[in-house]
Image (spheres, helix red, strand yellow):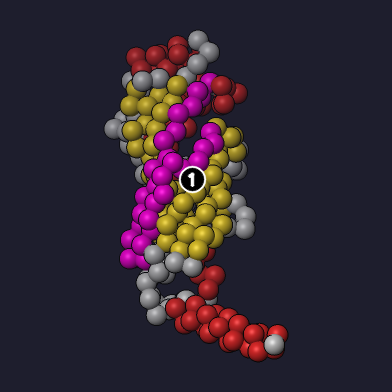
Amino acid sequence: MRKKILVPIVTISVFTFSLLMACSPSDPFTLLRCQFRIESTEDFFVAGIQLDSLENLSPAQIIEVVSTWTSGSCPVDFTLNVGIFNPNDGSTGPDIIPATLTSLAWDLYLDGDSGESFDTTWVASGVMSEALEVPGSGETVILPLDISIDAFVVMGEMGPMDFIDLALAIGGIDSGLRDSDHLGRVLVIAVPTITTPFGPMTYSGSLCINLDWID
C-alpha cells in the first residue's frame, strides 16, 4: 500500500519541479540578482541651509554652520536615492519576472576623508517602510531613504570646515557627479529581501552599495 501511495507523490513532485524550471530563467538564482547602486541625493539641508543649488556656502552661511557646530549640534536632513534594477526582462528566460523589494535593513556610512582612502564613518541605520515593486522592464526604480542625523554627534572629529566640504560634495550642486570625490563618498550596507512569483528570497550576505551596480 505504501508503494502505491509514494508513486503518485513522486510523480507530482517531479512534475511541479519541471513546471517551475520551465517558468524560471535559465539561471534560477537570477531571481536574487536585483542590482543596487547609489543614484543621487536631494533636499540636502545642513543647519537649515539647503545645499542642492549651491556651489559653495557664502561667508555668512559658513559662520552660521560653524556657530551651530560649536554649540554642540549640527542637524542634517536629506534624501538618499538608491537605484534598483531588475535584470529579469525576459532575455534570460521565457518571461519577464517582476520582483518586489519587501525589506531592506540598511546602514549608511560617509567618507570623512577627501583623499583616496575611504574613511568609513557610520552615521545612520534604518529599515525601509513600504514595499517597492521592481518590474523587469529595463528601468531603474528609485528607493528614497530619508536621512536625519546630527553631524556633530556622529562626525564631530572632522571639524566644521571638513564637514562642510563633505556636505557640499555629496549634497551640493555637483553632488550628482559619479566619482570618488562626490557620490563615491556615500556607502550603504544593506540586506534586501525580495518577493518573486516563486516566494520570498533574502540575500545571503550584506551588499555594499556604492557607485557601481552590485548584486
Q: What residue do we see at 58% from left, 35% from top?
A: 122
Would you identify the image quadrant in which residue 96 lies? bottom left
Residue type at the position of mark 1: Gly
Q: Find residue 150 and report its horizontal and vertical position in percent.
A: 50, 23
179 displayed left or right of 189: left
Please tell me which residue lies in front, 118 or 35: 35
Q: Find residue 31 and report its horizontal and vertical position in percent.
A: 49, 67
Please tell me which residue lies in front, 59 or 23: 23
Label 1 neighbourhood size at 10 Å, few (<14), some (14-19), many (20+)? Answer: many
In the picture of the structure, the residue carrying the numbered disc 1 is 184
Main SS type for the magenta part?
Answer: strand
Q: Find residue 8 and report its horizontal and vertical position in percent.
A: 59, 86
Q: What residue do we see at 66% from left, 85% from top?
A: 6
Furthest toward the front, the residue is 1
Classify 50 as above or below 40: above
* Residue 41 in view (yes/no): yes
Q: Find residue 5 and report its horizontal and vertical position in percent.
A: 64, 85
Classify 48 as above or below 188: above
Chain part drawn in magenta: 124-152
Secondary structure under badge 1?
A: helix
Residue 118, magenta (yes or no):
no
Classify 76 as above or below 135: above
Would you identify the image quadrant in which residue 23 lies? bottom left
For the N terminus, the quadrant is bottom right
Furthest toward the right, the residue is 2
31 displayed left or right of 6: left
* Residue 115 in view (yes/no): no
Residue 125, magenta (yes or no):
yes
Q: What residue do we see at 46% from left, 43% from top?
A: 128
